[in-house]
Image (cartoon, grey):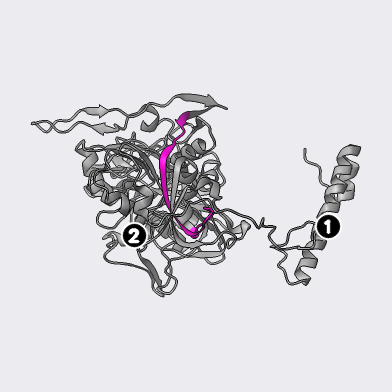
Amino acid sequence: MLARFTSVRAATRALPRASAARVVVARANLQSQRSYAVAATSAGFSALDSIPAKCDNVGDVPYIKDHTEGGKLYPNAAEAVKDIESGSMILSAGFGLCGTAETIITALHERPELKDLTVVSNNAGNVGQGGLYPLIASKQISKMILSYVGTNKTLSDAYINGEVALELSPQGTIAERLRSAAAGMPGFYTRTGAGTAVETGGIPIQWSRPDANGKQTVAVPGNKKEAREFDGKRYIFEPALKGDVAIFRAWKVDKAGNCVFRYTTRAFATLVAKAARIAIVEAENIVEVGDLHPMEIDLPGIYVNRIVPSTVEKKIELVTLHTEEGAEVDPDAAPMNPNQEARIRIAKRASKELKDGFYCNLGVGIPVLAANYTPPGVNVWLQSENGILGMGRYPTKEQLDADVINAGKETVTLRPGASVFDSAESFTMIRGGHVDVSILGAMEISQNGDLANFMVPGHLVKGMGGAMDLVSNPESTKVVSVTMHTDKKGNPKILEECSLPVTGVRVVSRIITDLAVFDVDLEKGGLTLVEVAEGHTVDEIKQKTGAPFKVADNLGSF
């Protein structure tokens, strides 16, 4: 039982004498720090910048004057990459096109003799747009380790045709594998991917080339993971991921290699830099040593080996703007869905899952629309797995910023009180169950709450992104799946068992479609119909659902 005390004095009475003495000393130190902060403010310094030490230069940075730079600055990217060898493992930062080292990638592409590269990245870049696409198109990459293929049809087709190896790994797992390598650890155990093809090695890393009859076999099988149980839950072991070279972009870099990142560009930057033998940063602004305040440095220079000037213009993958009428999407980037009315109906119902004060993660597509329909007075904190807590609406043209995007690569804003962070921090929030509710899309959902939403073998290789992480702790984070009730051919998407590779086993506790709302019993299995969309009937829902279900006594509507 926790005791409550009304004062420090009361608390110290309950402590042993030595402990009480330490509390008194700590209180004295705190009072001393406060007095110095006040003195600093009155002298013209900010209390936030003050140094709570008894010295004459309160608020000043205690720099050593005789600093030697260390020769990390290179004249251009070509010079910095000229000694990279074929067969190297490259750790590439960026989320979509945000924070991607376009200048360095261009320099690598201009070395056609550089072949057989293994590249680790969250995304693969877009056809014709940028990112890693030039290296994929030139076939300089022989293997990729990533979480999301997305719309890169060149890479997807190359994988399906056996031309490139592809190891799909959950986004949070990639982040933690990099962090483990940086910390000198062999790996870690995680619930993410347990019970799925990630554990069994069921996703081939590489297919053979088609023979004369068009048939293929598995050339390189997936990596089967060691599994163990802790506290009655299943975990799998993921090995550390160490690279030869890291490439990333930063906003400001001093000549000692200290880096400052803007907003969501930091997603994987700090992680790849720490996990590679050689880290190369392209800097938008190169400044002198001492120009950066110690408290604004995101990545200490010890992790950076080479600095080059950034010369390639930033690109925005999905320019999405806010208007008085709502969201306006760039027509060249994302065409409107023909089922918009049904999607909005689902989003409006899903918004009721967002309670006041909740921390929520909303997936790409229909889930993210739910935030537009929260009732007045309901205040929720939106978490985006690329590194935002406190995500706002889409920007106006004047607010547009290439460095502020959501997990769907759309441009967004930040609300007051927002914070930005790297992917290791983001997935600590997610895997640790600190997020109250996660809303995700689906290709299929089983009657027991299994979710499939990342690939159709032999046809669509989208990748799991952060979805496997988002469903990895269903006891602490409520997982809601939103989807059209049937696919384009009229086939049910709610089934007795999923036919596609699953994202998570027994994870979805509520299903919301354009026709109905179901609750899922995650312990015993089975569905209960709790709400029916206006204009539809229970009989219609039975015909369009591929699994049996109970009907709630107090059946509602929406």
Which residue has dot 1 on it? 32
Q: Nearer the viewer, residue 525 or 475?
A: 475
Q: Nearer the viewer, mark 2 or mark 1?
A: 1
Image quadrant for the C terminus?
A: bottom left
Q: CA distance from mark 2 to mark 1?
A: 51 Å
Q: Secondary structure at mark 1?
A: helix
Residue 490 pos. (x, y %): 23, 47
At 91% from the left and 38% from the top, the residue drawn is 17
Identity of the amino acid at label 1? Ser
Q: Is residue 241 magenta?
A: yes
Q: Nearer the viewer, residue 189 or 301?
A: 301
Reading the chain from its start, which is encountered first: label 2 or label 1?
1
At 89% from the left and 43% from the top, the residue drawn is 21
Quadrant for residue 356, please give it.
bottom right
Which residue has dot 2 on it? 317
At 42% from the left and 38% from the top, the residue drawn is 243
Could you tell whether 39 is left or right of 285 in the image? right
Residue 269 pos. (x, y %): 46, 50
Residue 234 pos. (x, y %): 49, 28
Is 242 placed above or below 386 here? above
Residue 26 visible in this rendered orientation of the protein: yes
